[in-house]
Each structure stands twice: as structure tokens, then as C-alpha cells.
Image (cartoon, rainbow, N blue to C red):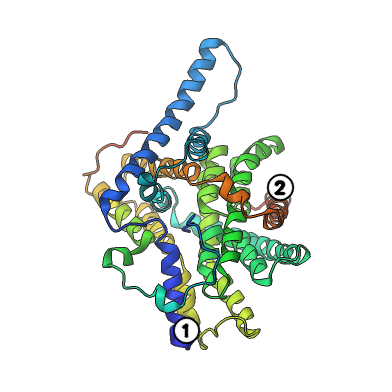
Amino acid sequence: MSVTDNAREIAETADEADHSAFTSRRPLDYLPGILLLIAVGLAGKYAEKGWLALAKHQHWTVPDIEYVLWAIVIGLLITNTIGLHPIFRAGVATYEFWLKVGIVALGSRFLLGDIGKLGGPILVQILIDMTIAGAIILFAARLFGLSGKLGSLLAIGTSICGVSAIVASKGAIRARNSDVSYAIAAILGLGAVALFTLPPLGHAIGLTDHEFGLWAGLAVDNTAETTATGYLFSDEAGKIAVLVKSVRNALIGFVVLGFALYWASRGEADQVAPGVRARAAFIWAKFPKFVLGFLAVSAVATLGWLNKGQLTNLANVSRWAFLLTFAGVGLNTDIRAIARAGWRPLVVAVIGLVVVAAVSLGLVLLTSRVLGWSIS
Amino acid sequence: MTEGRTNVADTDIPDHSAVAEPRSPGLRLGVDGWANLLVGIVVVLAIANLLPKIPW
């Protein structure tokens, strides 16, 4: 394959990752699934209120179960009991789109100066976290006899941004589709575990909203699960988790390029076109463009073009979009499909989760409580 | 980032020529592009005071 062909494939692979939310060309195909997302999201929202009202009426002392968890659990129950009818699939897959809408609209809640101020410390923590976690995953993958490329995929998925990073890398490192499936299943399993374990752990440890947001942003691999984990703890923690995860996502091109160059040097992947320009094009092809929208909306808020009521409106757009995302996370998580991947990649992924969670928690506590780095 | 949950067949990745089907201009914008466009419209409406109050 020529360098030009390779560059074209890289661009197409990036497109492929980007298009996973839009699976049909007929707009009407999306309607049933989107209506289901809305129904599950609303059911989650009202379940939270209903649960508290019932507990109050019966004089029970119960924890406040957030709408985020209700929406995910209702979605999970539907998919893993009665199953998702094919008519809903196209619309339900759009939850990735609603996630991006939610993040871009969330830009209105950050001033550009704050992003600049937070970005430096966050970037340092991400780089330390990524290096340690990536190295341990590669070691664990070798220990459990996984192929080198599966190890690379798991390291990319764990250290950067989950499934999309894996999909974006598969063409660049010429991974087998079976390895891609394994890595995706492992990362999804890991995301589900993190979603249900990190928030109670965060409360038990006594983390602040900002500390937990930073931890979730560093430790959870998939952007949708990161957002849900953060919002499960608190609104403020969700906001910080999204910011941290967006910085992680912005680094995807550099990490994929590194792995592509490594496998090309071993003759097991196509050569990446030489030269700074070609490599800059590679990084740009992988760059998540929603980050630009997030920064643009933040710039509008920073310039003072929106009054308080308009900012509240945009924050509510973000909340509704996230609500559809959380419903989609539950509806798209097929536990049987994850279990079918076998135990070895899952063990490596669980090791990854424990290591990443421990390393990132250590980093969060070190920077916030020992070094006094403030991200508020 | 976008996280697809599609099932992938247990085969080698297809030849790039098979992936290179022409796409419609609508799809070419991508998920991120559509999200940026939608929120961009909402922000313009908000600045112009044309966005109705959105409850939560």
C-alpha cells in the first residue's frame, strides 16, 4: 500500500469512528430510537423524584438515587431482558451525537481563562497517568499472552479515550478485527464497572466535587461513561470530568501516531508518511472536532455575549443532551456481548481499571492535597 | 470522543478499497460537525434572544 493510500485510509478510519452514531441515511429511521432515548431519560428523571417521594411517604431513609443512574439502569434492563428491537437501533446509536451536543453546550459554563488555567495542571496529570497506565497495560497484556497489537489497542483505549481511540487506531496499526472486538468489549466492561464503583468510592474517601471530577476524567475511558460517572457524583464533578476527558481526547492523534510509528518500524503496519506536515495532518485527522465547538461556545460566554438567563438555557440544553446520552449508555450495554469476549482481555482491562483508578486517585490527592494545585 | 458499539466480524480488516465508498455530503460532516452546528444554531438563537426558556 502506498503512502497516499495509507493517508487516505487513516482519514477514512477517523471518519469511520466519527460516523458510528449515524448508521442510516434515512432520517425517519432515527425517530423510534430517539423517542426511546427520550422516554428512558424522562423515566429516569421522574424515577428519581418518585423514589424520593415514595421514601418520604413511607418514612424510609434511602439514598438519593440520581436520575443518571436511573436512566442507565432502565436502559440496561431493557437491553438485557426484552432486548432492543432493530427498529430502535439507529436512533439509540445517536447517543454519541447527544453526548457531543452536551459537551459543546457545556462550554458556556467555562470561561476561556479558566480553561487555560486548568488546562496546564490537567495536562501534566494526564501525561503522567497515561504513561504509567499505558506501560502497565502493555506489561499485563504480555503477561497474559495477548497479542502485541491487542495489548497496544488496550493501552490506547485505557490511556486515551476508549472505543473511539481503538477504532481510530485499527487502520493505523493494521490490527485484526478480532483484536479490535476484544479490546472494545474489554473497555466497555471496564466502563460499566467504573460507573458503578467510582462514585460510592469517591463518597467513601471523602473527595470534593473537583477532586472526584478530576479522578473520573482521568480514570474512566469512554467519554459517555466518564460524563455519567462524574454526574453521578454531582453536577460540578460532571462538569470537571467532561473538561478533563476533553483534554485527554484532544491527545488522541499523538498517541495513535506513536503506536503507528512503532508498528511500522517493526514492519507490521504501513509506513506513516514522513515529514512534519504529513504527521500534522495525521494528528488533525484524529483530533476530536467537538473540542473546537466547546472552545468556541466558551469564547462566546467569555466575551459576555450571553446574559445569565441565556447561559442557564444553554446549561439546560447540555443537561437534556446528557440525559439522552445516559439513556443510550444503558440501552447500548449488552452484558452478554461483553461476556462473550472471554476472560483474558477482561482480566487485563480490570487490571487496567484498578491501576488507572489507583494511579489517578494518587495523582489527584497528591496534587490537590499535598501540592495544593487548585482546579476550582 | 465517539465510541461506537458495533459488532466487528472476526476477520482481518477489509481492504481499503472496500472502505472507500463515497459518502453523502451530510454524513461527511461527521458527528462532531453536526453537534457543533446544532449548538452553534442554539447559541446564535440565544444571543438573538430567540431561544425559548428551556426548563430542567
Q: Amino acid at mark 2?
A: Arg
Residue A119 seen in the figure: no
Q: Is residue B2 above or below residue A313?
A: below
Q: CA distance from mark 2 to mark 1?
A: 43 Å
Of the residues under marks 2 and 1, which one precedes in the sequence?
A: 1
The kind of secondary structure element at disc 2 is helix
> Which subunit holds the residue at mark 2?
A
Residue that mark 1 sits on: A278
Q: Label for residue A307?
A: none
User: In this orientation, does residue A8 appear?
Assistant: yes
- Badge 2: residue crowd in 10 Å (few <14, some 14–19, many ≥20): few
Amino acid type, label 1 = Ala
Q: Residue furthest right?
A: A143
In the drawing, what numbered circle is on residue A369?
Answer: 2
Question: Tag 1, which chain?
Answer: A
Vertical position of residue B19 compared to residue A324: above or below: below
Percent x, y of residue B52: 24, 39
Whether residues under marks 2 and 1 lie with C-beta atoms below 8 angstroms apart, the answer is: no
Q: Secondary structure at mark 1?
A: helix
